[in-house]
């Protein structure tokens, strides 16, 4: 039997979430999420298209990546996420609870200091390997 937001195992889950990471949402994407209820999946499938709908928190939540947000500014990504959140018609959802996660600007980017550390590690490895021969 799978859980959904109305299952006893999901009660209070909303209050227990400290981050969208716990739902399985990668930090480098903009996502829209809702409690997984009887009506949520069909509407989210339609509104999130072409992105697939994912299940998080052991079936308690559904989420999808908001299409077209990669490489956008946080403001542009938030506007696209709001469009997805307003996609449903009255009666499409049996709860009004929902949320968005805006991609972290630094996620997936290599910073100069990060690149320097990586180059230092590679140089150390090369010296170690040359010392073996």
Image (cartoon, rainbow, N blue to C red):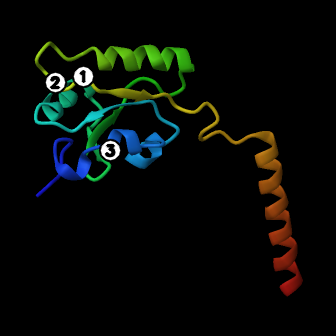
Residue 43 picture quarter:
top left
* Residue tagged 3: 13
Please state if 101 lies on the left or on the right of 86 as rendered: right
Mark 1 residue element: loop
- Residue 59 visible to an observer of this rendering: no
Is the Cβ of the residue at disc 2 closer than 8 Å to that at disc 1? Answer: yes
* Residue tagged 2: 93
Cα gap from disc 3 to disc 2, whole angstroms? 19 Å
Q: Position of residue 22 (x, y in %)?
A: 43, 48
Cα gap from disc 3 to disc 1, whole angstroms? 15 Å
For disc 1, the neighbor class at 10 Å (few under 14, some 14 to 19, many from 20) is few
Say whether disc 3 or disc 2 marks the residue closer to the N-terminus: 3
| Front residue of this view, candidates 101 and 19 | 19
Give above or below for 83 relative to 30: above
* Residue tagged 1: 96
Say whether disc 3 or disc 1 marks the residue closer to the N-terminus: 3
Residue 68 picture quarter:
top left
| Label placed on residue 73 | none
Mark 2 residue element: loop
Mark 3 residue element: helix
Q: Position of residue 99 (x, y in %)?
A: 37, 27
């Amino acid at each position: 039997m799978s859980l959904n937001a109305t299952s006893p195992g999901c009660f209070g889950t909303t209050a227990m979430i400290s981050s969208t990471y716990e739902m399985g949402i990668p930090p480098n994407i903009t996502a829209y999420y809702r409690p997984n209820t009887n009506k949520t999946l069909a509407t989210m499938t339609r509104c999130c298209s072409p992105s697939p709908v994912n299940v998080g928190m052991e079936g308690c939540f559904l989420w999808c990546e908001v299409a077209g947000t990669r490489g956008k500014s946080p403001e542009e990504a938030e506007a696209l996420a709001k469009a997805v959140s307003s996609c449903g018609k009255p009666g499409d959802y049996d709860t009004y609870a929902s949320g968005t996660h805006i991609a972290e600007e630094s996620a997936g980017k290599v910073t100069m200091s990060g690149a320097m550390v990586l180059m230092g590690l590679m140089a150390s490895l090369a010296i170690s390997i040359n010392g073996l021969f």
